[in-house]
Amino acid sequence: MKPIWIVDDDQSIRFVLEKALAREELPVRSFTNPKDVLAALDDNDEPQVLVSDIRMPGGSGIDLLAKVKERHPGLPVIIMTAYSDLDSAVSAFQGGAFEYLPKPFDLPKAVELIRRAVDESVREEVGDERYAQMPEMLGQAPAMQDVFRAIGRLSQSNVTVLITGESGSGKELVARALHKHSPRASGPFVAINTAAIPKDLLESELFGHERGAFTGAQTMRRGRFEQADGGTLFLDEIGDMPFDLQTRLLRVLSDGQFYRVGGHQPLKSNVRVIAATHQNLEERVKQGVFREDLFHRLNVIRLRLPALRERREDVAGLARFFLQKSAKELGVEAKRISEPALARLTSFDYPGNVRQLENVCHWLTVMAPAQVIEDKDLPPELLGEATMSPKPQVSIESSAIASPPPVQWPAPAVAGYEPPVPAPDPIASLTSAPSTAMGAWIMDLEREARHLLESGRPEVWDALTRQFEACLIHTALEITRGRRIEAAQKLGIGRNTITRKIQELGLDD
């Protein structure tokens, strides 16, 4: 690990921090002024974490912060400040400081803060390496892994593929991946959204037109089928294609021939067709608005892309990636996201799927006031989400077998829950009807207790009590970003109690 750099003209501060960090087996390098720090950076040295005073002879810690961030945007910088400098410390956050450390400081708290900054730095390094070689698609969820395996199996095939899934779930990304990993990868990838083009123009867009074919056709124009010759044509939202055009499309898929609008010479195009829709095509066929023979022609291989709420374990990775991407596009430093904010992001249902999450991350990059995004910084539509739907585990329709989600206890915190006014009696809240937010987790607790008691498990009281206490303390520490005293105050217990409980429950590990 790289050393922690301490910058302070006060020898006693440097000495105390050096000894404390050495006991933690953390390497340290000390400097007395910003000039020496910048010289070390010029020599290609780099710290894991930089801890700097604000006021020093020969330079300001705020100026040093700005210069360091220019060279190493992801480096955590902790600003040490006297209480009289608190306004300066707060302004340091505008420059991207990780945290500030007021003097005189409690040494264990200072070490704990530096340790958190080290953990953040290591995460950033792993993330940067991962994003530097980011694939075209992301997903650790089983449902997405099924999609990736299907893409791999289809990599040497030219077969027609139908991709189904909700709007914003990434159907075009799957189509591009199928093209990229196919024998046609060197050919063009041409995409057209059949729902976004007026019916009168769609035929010309697909098949082209001859000069004079209709008013305004001043020149001959090649259609998408010709443009995609030797490659892949992606027909998005195929379920919305007008019925009469479906007949022409079926003819092209059957014999590979078509006519430009106003043309008399048959044209051939060597194209692989990948279609996508968010609609139920079987139902559209029953309604008589989609040709059954075209449906069977397209439905050779069908891939179902899961909605984002079905792959919640991917939200964290996607959010960090989109924050990096937005920061790069805007030319600013990428923001980090706290664990409570990430938990709130994960609990949202995302009716707009991955596209909506990307928009949220872009909004946060512009609107979040600090470098670390807290849950209060999230947009209103996320703060108002009150429920969390089950998480199916399917992605390829041919093997889709839905299984009920496991009972989880304690239940996830309900985002956006507001108690009625006047405030309810706390005991009554715990025993209220199951339809309330509180009642839901009580029911989960009851089911879990019943299961353990009926299975004959010993010491049920101790087991559930330990889980309950661990959940409360872990959540409080997440909200306070590891500050134990503040967590104890929020929980209404003493400092010694939370320390003892953390040791007993093994939460230090």
Image (cartoon, grey):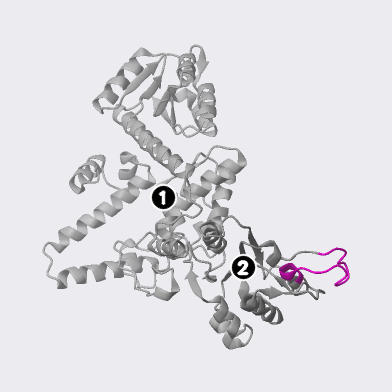
Q: Is residue 113 above or below residue 479?
A: above
Membership of 208 in magenta stretch: yes
Q: Secondary structure at mark 2?
A: strand
Q: Position of residue 3 (x, y in %)?
A: 35, 25
Kindly tell me whether residue 267 is visible in this rendering: yes
Q: Nearer the viewer, residue 236 or 346?
A: 236
Kindly tell me whether residue 198 is visible in this rendering: no
Q: Secondary structure at mark 1?
A: helix
Q: Which residue is mark 1?
A: 340
Q: Amino acid at mark 1?
A: Pro
Rendering quarter of residue 405: bottom left
Question: Magenta span covers which residues?
Answer: 204-220
Q: Position of residue 124 (x, y in %)?
A: 43, 39
Q: Earlier in the sequence, mark 2 or mark 1?
A: 2
Write the residue at 31% across / 16% down: 15
The quadrant of the picture occupied by the C terminus is top left
| Left or right position of 132 against 190 | left
Write the residue at 87% across / 67% down: 216
Q: Which residue is mark 2?
A: 236
Write the residue at 61% across / 65% down: 234
Q: Is residue 271 above or below residue 103?
A: below
Q: Residues within 10 Å of mark 2 (few under 14, many from 20)?
A: many
Write the residue at 46% across / 14% down: 36
Q: Amino acid at mark 2?
A: Asp
Q: Nearer the viewer, residue 502 or 366?
A: 366
